[in-house]
Image (spheres, rainbow, N blue to C red):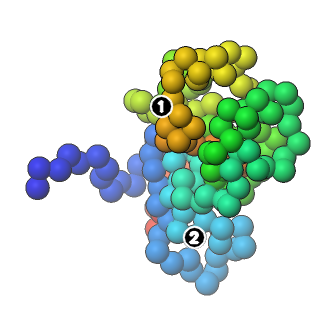
Amino acid sequence: RGMELWAVPTTVVEKGSVVVAASALSSAATLLQQHRQEAVIFIFQHDNSGTRGLILNRPTSLTLGRTLIQSSSGETNLRQLFSENVLYMGGGEIGESVFVLHSRPDLWTDSEEVISGIYRAGGVVPEDLGARLESTGRTMSERSEQFKFYCGQESWGPGELDLEVRDGLW
């Protein structure tokens, strides 16, 4: 009572959706599908070219300051600025860059708004990010609440996720 409804069950997938894995995989599930068991995935792209999303509930034991990934100077800067932020496993498709979900487009200017108030950025660290962060006076702990970092992503070809939803996998 009195709670605002912020999510509703639906079979329609769109940009900004969150899909939740069905409680149990069938015995026919492939090894590829097993890593999605109990996954909660935020969809940041859903169009004619396919669907991409980030698994929200797979934190690793690493922080950005403790990653072993070789990095460019921008990524080194990123690791220093967000050294205490936990690195999440965003999905099984591992690429060369880290994805960021955040709520501060004023600080991370090269971002795409996925849904109102949630932005996605990838790889390229704005040159003045350090100065912008310092000017806010935010602590490392406060930064970790506003910026979430993901290694990897989930992806589906055109219409594939819609079929999986229809088949009850999500």
Which residue in the protein does label 1 denote? 103
Q: Residue at x 59, y 17 (%)?
A: 132
Count of numbered badges drawn on the protein: 2
Depicted 105 relative to depicted 44: above or below: above
Estimate the x, y position of residue 47 in percent, counting from the top left: 56, 36
Depicted 115 relative to depicted 152: above or below: above
Query: Mark 1 or 2 closer to N-term?
Result: 2
Label 2 packing within 10 angstroms: few (<14), some (14-19), many (20+): some
Can residue 155 be seen from the camera position used here? no
Which residue in the protein does label 2 denote? 37
Q: What's under tag 2, amino acid-wise?
A: Gln
Local secondary structure at mark 2: loop
Estimate the x, y position of residue 78 in percent, counting from the top left: 72, 32
Q: Residue at x 50, y 65 (%)?
A: 21
- Residue 151, numbered label: none
Can residue 3 be seen from the camera position used here? yes
